[in-house]
Each structure stands twice: as C-alpha cells, then as structure tokens.
Amino acid sequence: MTLEEAIERALKQNPQMVQAAGSIRNARASERSAFGAYLPSLSATANGTLSSSDRLNPDTGTIVSGSNDSYSAGLSASWDVFTGGRRSAARQQAQAEFQSAEAQLTTQRFSVSLSVQSAFFEALRADELMAVTRSRIELAQQGITAAERRLAVGSATRSDVLRAQLELNTARGTLLQQESQRFAAALNLGRLTGLEQPVAPSTDTPIQPVPLTLSREELVNVLLAKAPAVRSAEAAVASAEAGIRSAKAQYLPSVGLSAGYNWFNEDIAITGGRTSWSVRLGLSYPIFDGFVRDEGKVRARTQAEVAQSQLADAQHAVRTETERVLNQLQLAEERVVLSRQAVEVAQEDLRVQQERYRLGATTILELLTSQTALIEAQNNLVGLRFDYQQSRAELESIAGRKL
C-alpha cells in the first residue's frame, strides 16, 4: 500500500475525522439558523370541535339532546423588527464557529496523516534495517570462510573462527528482532487504515530529504497567519467579541411585528363562516431583570479575555514548534550528508581490513571492528533519513498543508 492510499483510507474511517466532519455540518446548520432569525416566522393552525349539549324544550318540558360543532383555521406571522443587534451578533458567532470547525477539521486531517506517516515510515525503516542486517549476516559468513581458510593453512587460531561465528549468531538474532518490529509496525498501519491484517508499505515511496520551498522566515510567517491552531483561536476571539455585542444588546429594547388571519365556522364547509384579522406592533424593554444582563456582560468579557490569551498562546506555540521542527529538519539533513560519507569511509575501511586479513596482516578482531563500524554507519543513515521524514510530517501537521 502506498502512503497516499494509506492516508486516504485512514481519513475515511478515523472516528475523530467523522466527529470533525459532523461539527462542520452542525456549524453550517447554526449559520442557517442565525440567518433565519432575520426572516419572519409563519405558522398555521386548524381545529375542529364536536361536543354534545342537552337543553330543555319549553313546549314539551322534556330534555332534548343535540350537538355543538365548531371549526376554525388560522394563519399567523411574526417578525422581529429590531433586536438591539442580537441577531447580527448571533450570526457572527455562528460564522466564527464554522471557521473554527473548519480549522479543527484541518487539524484532525493532518493529525491522522501524521499518525499514518509515522506507522508507514516505521515499517519502511524496519525493512531497510533488515536489509542492513542481512548484509551483516553475509559479511559474517564471509568472515567465517576467511577465518577457516586461514586456520587451514595455520595462519589463524580456532578463536578467529569462533569470533566470526559469534558475529553471525548475533546478526541472526538482530534480524529476528527486527522482523518482529516490522510485523508490529505493519499491524499498526493496518489498524490505522481500517484493516484487520498487517499492511506492507510500498517500497517505491521516496524518502530522500527534499528542501522546503519557503525560507525559514517565510515559513514561520505563513504558519503564524494560517496554521489551523491559530485560525481556530482567532475564530474563538471573533465569537467572544460577538458575544460581548450580544450581551450589550440586552440593554436595548426590542420591536416586534405580528399579523394573523382566522376563520371560524360551525359547519364543516369552506364557504360561509366568519373571518377576522389582526396586526400588532409591539415594543418590549426589560427595566430590571435581577442583574441577569450584567452577569451576561461580565461573562462575555471574561470569555473574550480568555480567547485573546489563548490566541497569543497558540501563536507562541506555533512559532516555538515550528522553530523546533525546522531545527530538527536542518540537523537531520546535515547529518544525512555526514552519515553517507561515514558509510563510504566504513566501506573502504572494511575493504582494506578484509584484504589485510586475507594476507595475514591483521587480526579477526580488527576485521570484526570494521564490520561493526560499517553496520552502525548504515543503521545511522537509515535512521536519519526516516527522522527527516518524520520531522517534515510534523511540520506539515503544524502548518495544516503540504510543504
């Protein structure tokens, strides 16, 4: 499975992504509701009543049973002419909540992407480490052959063969451990992608360091302006400020307009009957509400102060994390270059030691030391290449965009 396929599958089945998408739908519904507050409300009613009634017939002096039927229908509309700015504040809050939900969705998307990339690269790392260990096994076998050849001609001792055999056994044990680690990484990748089985990562994925398209200063400025964490905090500030305006609007009167049309008939028929209509314009102003408005204004201002503090903290956090990850990227990139050079030096050193051991000019201990140095250099190179990819994925998670 390629990295893109793994990320796509994980995004579709991740519970947090489903929740974030639901928050987007809820925020859209809130926006429609806030806009609907500007529109008049319309309602219709219909009633039918059938009741019995007894009366005295004065001519006969007897009780006569009968019925008393009534049917009615009505249509009414109402519209808030003036609300002191509460509707506009509610709409601004709804818009801010939608922006925050979008930012949270972006954050969650790249959080899932980071988790998948970590599992994916961990499985690839295990593959490459296993390849290094297999080359170590091959070198150990070559060392055994060389030691046995020298032992046969009397230029080496039995200890040389035993040390070479010990190196082979150690390498085989390391390979078994790495196979177990690779299997665990493949299982984790399968879980993230919604599969109940190990998933092997595609080996065609490029893992070489790729320079960033933006400079360090440009990248920091872009992230401070567009990072999802900052956008979400900015939306919270906008929502809190709208809350203050909504709280202040409680001190202003509200004006409402309503109209109604009603029909009444004693027979179940459309024709006939009586009709009535009404139009009402009213003003309402709460003179004293037990300090409820004051409490709402204090709470709104407190929330605004908290939101401003959280925005500043989010900006500081983004800057700090960006600088930290950029330093990791730069360090990993430079160490990859040095590690490649170390591998080349170790390969040449091992070649020289192998030739010297063949000629009897060195000991098995020096040969094994050169082999160990080469394996360590190759393992370091593998680790640094994947450390770079991990740091780059972390930076993209902070930015909420591909870099």
Image (cartoon, grey):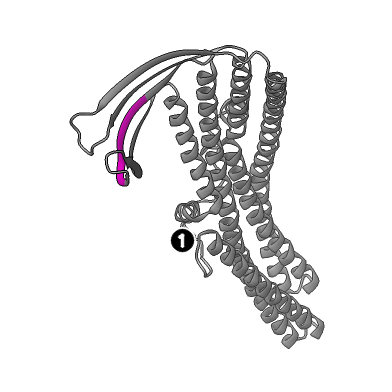
**Within the magenta stretch, is there residue 389?**
no
**Where residue 328 sits in the image (x, y, percent)?**
69, 41
- Please provide percent x and percent y for residue 188: 59, 63
Establish if 65 lies above or below 154: above
Is the stretch drawn in magenta largely helix, strand or loop? strand
Taking the magenta stretch, the answer to whether it contains residue 72 is yes
Q: Position of 58 compared to 21: left or right?
A: left
Of residues 325 and 310, the one nearer the viewer is 310
Q: Quadrant of the rendered structure where residue 323 is?
A: top right
| Left or right of 101, for residue 280 | left
Magenta span covers which residues? 64-76
Residue 344 visible in the current orientation? no
Q: Of the residues shown, which amino acid type is indicated by label 1?
A: Met
Q: Nearer the viewer, residue 42 or 49?
A: 49
Residue 13 shows in this picture: yes
Locate residue 133, reporting x and y percent: 65, 69
Foreground of the two, 312 or 61: 61
Q: Give the percent coordinates (x, y) of residue 202.
A: 48, 60
- Which residue lies under the disc numbered 1? 1
Please identify the quarter of the rendering in which residue 35 is found. Answer: top left
Q: Please determine whether, in this image, residue 199 is positioned above or below residue 345.
A: below
Q: Check disc 1 and report its element: helix, strand or loop.
A: loop
Which residue is found at the position 74% from the left and 78% from the top? 164
| Residue drawn 56% across the image and 12% down it | 253
From this view, report whether residue 215 is shown above or below residue 335: above
